Image (cartoon, helix red, strand yellow):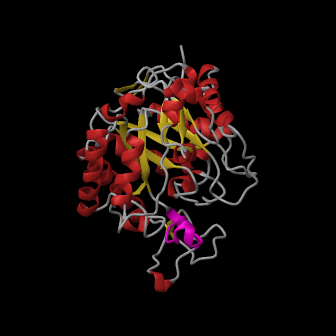
């Protein structure tokens, strides 16, 4: 039997397969509110056959966005707009739904990628960013504000309020974003956190604020919501986060009731990253060895169904998450099920395309 298409428990939820759709920023929101693009994009992915769809990095406060186009969950308008999208995904899709809650930190106040992605100029409604220290990481923009205790208290509470909004929306999974160079990652890495108070110094100090945020989110929602985290397995730089630190952080999250970790890498500072098929899978495998049984998800250039199957079957990770592969083929899980002799749930409107009902499926496979 295909291991990729075997069930797995994530917190209180049992997923029918081990395929997740990773959060993918769309830069198409209006002051944090979802638009018709999100309806089309997420609606398609909700009916893809993947077991879990995690909405893009969603800012917990307005100044926590990467760009003016980033999704947010910091206002009633944001919640109402997303409610419409979630309701449609729930009505017609088959995937469980989650959201990745995030704060961009020093990488905020940026142009969208197709406009260069650099820091916003004052005439483009730039805002003051926040970081562990007043260092922009070489971005070339204004220095971020070094977070005070009042800032940390405000951000923590913003995560709590966004989590409660997510729970009201009926989302089954909340993922705390602690990677890709954003605020939680900035606190975790010694390359971006040289604070001398209780939130800096050794790994225990650098983990303190991300763990406080996770604990606050976990406490803010009921047991029917699985709370996980996206973490970095490596900064790919000397003196930065490595597999050992990633494993220790994951183990601390597990002690606090974390339902899973998704292991990615990079994004803090420019680095030489050996991008290739499955290049981040060894990082997930290292984290998996460091925890007691918490599910670990692998990401990074996972493209072929046989590749995804091997990752699970060989014990490198418990799930895989796909991003660009799903943009390339929004029904990748259908194709994987055909190749691996697994099964996925089709919406009723698509059931006539199942292999048992459509002779063309065999021709396509051939």
> Where is residue 355 drawn, in percent x and y?
46, 23
The relative height of residue 229 versus residue 67 in the rendered view (above or below) is above
Query: What residue appears at the point 53 percent right and 19 percent down from the top-left corner?
Result: 341
The relative height of residue 109 versus residue 22 in the rendered view (above or below) is below
Camera-nearest residue between 348 and 201: 348
Residue at the outermost top position: 1
| Residue 107 counted in the magenta span | yes
- Toward which corner of the image does residue 366 lie, by quadrant? top right
The magenta segment is: 105-118
Camera-nearest residue between 20 and 143: 20
Query: What residue appears at the point 72 percent right and 43 percent down from the top-left corner?
Result: 276
Residue at the outermost bottom position: 123
Camera-nearest residue between 85 and 334: 334
| Residue 150 counted in the magenta span | no
Camera-nearest residue between 366 and 77: 366
Query: What residue appears at the point 54 percent right and 62 percent down from the top-left corner?
Result: 132
> Where is residue 59 drawn, in percent x and y?
40, 59
- Toward which corner of the image does residue 139 lie, by quadrant? bottom right
């Amino acid at each position: 039997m295909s291991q990729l298409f075997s069930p797995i428990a994530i917190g209180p939820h049992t997923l029918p397969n081990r395929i997740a759709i990773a959060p993918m920023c769309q830069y198409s929101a209006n002051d944090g509110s979802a638009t018709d693009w999100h309806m089309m994009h997420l609606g398609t992915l909700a009916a893809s056959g993947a077991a879990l769809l995690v909405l893009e990095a969603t800012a917990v406060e307005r100044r926590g966005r990467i760009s003016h186009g980033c999704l947010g969950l910091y206002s009633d308008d944001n919640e109402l707009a997303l409610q419409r999208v979630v309701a449609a995904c729930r009505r017609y899709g088959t995937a469980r739904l989650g959201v990745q809650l995030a704060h961009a930190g020093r990488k905020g106040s940026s142009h969208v990628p197709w406009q260069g992605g650099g820091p916003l100029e004052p005439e483009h409604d730039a805002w003051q960013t926040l970081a562990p220290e007043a260092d922009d990481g070489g971005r070339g923009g204004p220095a971020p504000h070094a977070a005070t205790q009042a800032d940390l208290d405000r951000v923590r509470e913003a995560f709590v309020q966004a989590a409660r909004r997510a729970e009201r929306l009926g989302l089954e999974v909340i993922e705390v974003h602690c990677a890709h160079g954003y605020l939680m990652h900035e606190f975790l890495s010694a390359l971006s956190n040289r604070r001398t108070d209780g939130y800096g110094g050794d790994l225990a100090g650098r983990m303190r604020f991300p763990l406080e945020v996770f604990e606050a989110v976990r406490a803010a929602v009921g047991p029917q919501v699985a709370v996980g985290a996206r973490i970095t397995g490596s900064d790919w730089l000397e003196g930065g986060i490595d597999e050992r630190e990633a494993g220790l952080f994951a183990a601390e999250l597990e002690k606090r009731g974390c339902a899973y970790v998704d292991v990615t890498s990079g994004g803090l500072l420019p680095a030489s990253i050996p991008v290739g098929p499955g290049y981040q899978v060894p990082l997930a495998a290292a984290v998996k060895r460091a925890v007691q049984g918490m599910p670990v998800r692998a990401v990074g250039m996972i493209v072929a169904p046989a590749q995804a199957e091997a990752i699970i079957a060989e014990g490198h990770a418990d799930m895989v998450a796909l991003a660009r592969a799903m943009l390339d083929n929004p029904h990748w899980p259908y194709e994987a099920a055909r190749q691996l002799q697994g099964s996925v749930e089709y919406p009723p409107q698509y059931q006539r395309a199942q292999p048992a009902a459509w002779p063309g499926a065999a021709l396509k496979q051939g």
